[in-house]
Image (spheres, rainbow, N blue to C red):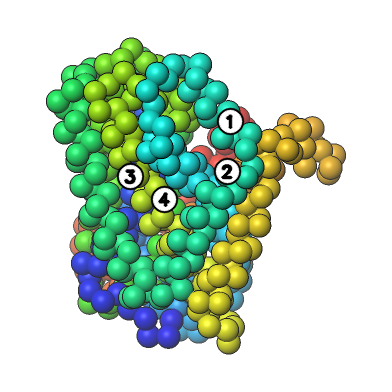
Amino acid sequence: MHGKTWSSNLLFLIAAIGTEAGIANVWKFSYLAGANGGGLFVALYFIALIVIAAPALMAEMLIGRLGGQSVMGNMRALAQRHGISRGWRAFGALALVCIFLILSYYLVICGWMLYYFVLSIVHGFAGTTAASAEAMNARMLASPGAMLACSGAFVIATCFVVAQGVNRGIERVAGVLTPLRFAILIGLFVYALCFADVGAAARFLFTIDFSKLNWHIVIVAVGQAFFSLGIGVGTMMTMGAYMRAEYSIPRAVITVAVAQGLVALVSGLSIFPLVFQYGLEPAQGPGLIFVTLPVAFAQMPGGAVFGALLFMLLSFAALTATIVMLETIVAFLEEYSTRSRPLLAWLTGLALWLAGMLTVFSFNRWQGVHPLRWIGLSSDKTFFDVLDYLTSNLMMPLGGLLVALMAGWALSRDVVCRELRLGNGPAFRLWYVSVRYVVPVAVLVIFISIQSS
């Protein structure tokens, strides 16, 4: 990868934590916990994080450092150095296509965070009712101009950082935004502790009601733990390629996983106290942040400030994630092109913004367009629905499965043992069994369950 490495192990950790503890750990974790039994979901999520997600993340990171190149370059390098089949290049292609498609709509969702941040600064949420919050959200979705402007702002910020490179761009921004995000999150938690019903939130998040246990909640919890780490799309493989050779991969993964779990819990303990304090519905689903909480902001002291800080936190979380996602694509292009990094970053950003129009228009002008019907399928999915289903339900599970199979079966036991530096003791054997058997079976079960539902 042209000799690029993180300036220090600490900066790598900060960037990795900033990437993994993204909006999926603040927004999605909260609404999934609310809709899936609270404490039972949280318990299942942490079990899956330890048993499935962390071993898979370790596998992806070690593949990245072994290859030392982009996602596609890694497959070529591993074939040359360690004798894996050249057919594994298909994984590189899958990961790059998947990350491009995800970024095309993820940048639009990031724009929603920015839109609400600006809204909270300019207008606040005074007098907001459930009906007016619904109408406010509907106005945003009905305005392609506003969504394109907000997603465009995210594209510009992301491209600017990636164009500067790993050390001058990604490290510096992650080194500022990640600690700032944690400071904001702690501030929100302290506010909730002082002014909202933390006791009810704690009971909701930590009381396990086994009568609610069903297969659906298990699948959702495992899926959230696995896919919130972005396993299978090459981001952590790219970050692993920049890792210093002496740094411990298991230590890095444990730190990232613990940080991710803490962010998820503290986010829940910052958001749900407001929900219970003002008698709102915890099982609101994806609308929890955009529809339910603005009603609480309107009633609580300092609600405008709390709302602005929450959406600032989400915007920063989104930006740290989009930076590394774009870096995954640009690193590949840089290896296979003679063009400069800044040009490649800006051209990719433009392509992503244009592709994002499919998502933007899915909520307004093209809401009645159902592309799957063009190929004879009876489906009401919009362009956004198709992109989300294709990446989240098909490509990411397949990518995660391939990562586990590559580390557990394609690479030799001796190679991965040396790279992890765990020796041949119980810790390595547990990880090896997990990545060879537990992770592939879990991903296959998730995949089959998603398709059958």
Please report the residue visible at 29 percent of the width from the left and 56 percent of the height from the top. 177
Q: CA distance from mark 1 to mark 2?
A: 10 Å
- Residue at 46% x, 34% y: name it: 219
Q: Residues within 10 Å of mark 4 (few under 14, many from 20)?
A: many
Q: Nearer the viewer, residue 221 or 174?
A: 174
Marks 3/1: CA–CA distance: 23 Å
Q: Is residue 244 above or below residue 399?
A: below
Q: Are marks 3 and 1 in contact (CB under 8 Å)?
A: no
Which residue is label 1 attached to?
139
Q: Which residue is mark 4?
A: 318
Of the two numbered discs 2 and 3 on the same chain, state the one appearing first in sequence: 2
Quadrant housing the N terminus: bottom left
Q: Earlier in the sequence, mark 4 or mark 3?
A: 3
Q: Using residue 139 as the reference point, say whether residue 191 is left or right of it.
A: left
Closest to the camera, between mark 3 and mark 1, is 1
Instruction: Tell me the CA gap for discs 4 and 3.
Output: 9 Å
Left or right of residue 80, residue 413 in this image: left
Q: Earlier in the sequence, mark 3 or mark 1?
A: 1
Which mark identifies residue 81?
A: none
Q: Amino acid at mark 1?
A: Arg
Q: CA distance from mark 2 to mark 3?
A: 20 Å
In percent of width and height, residue 44 lies at 33, 33
Label 1 secondary element:
helix
Residue that badge 3 annotates? 313
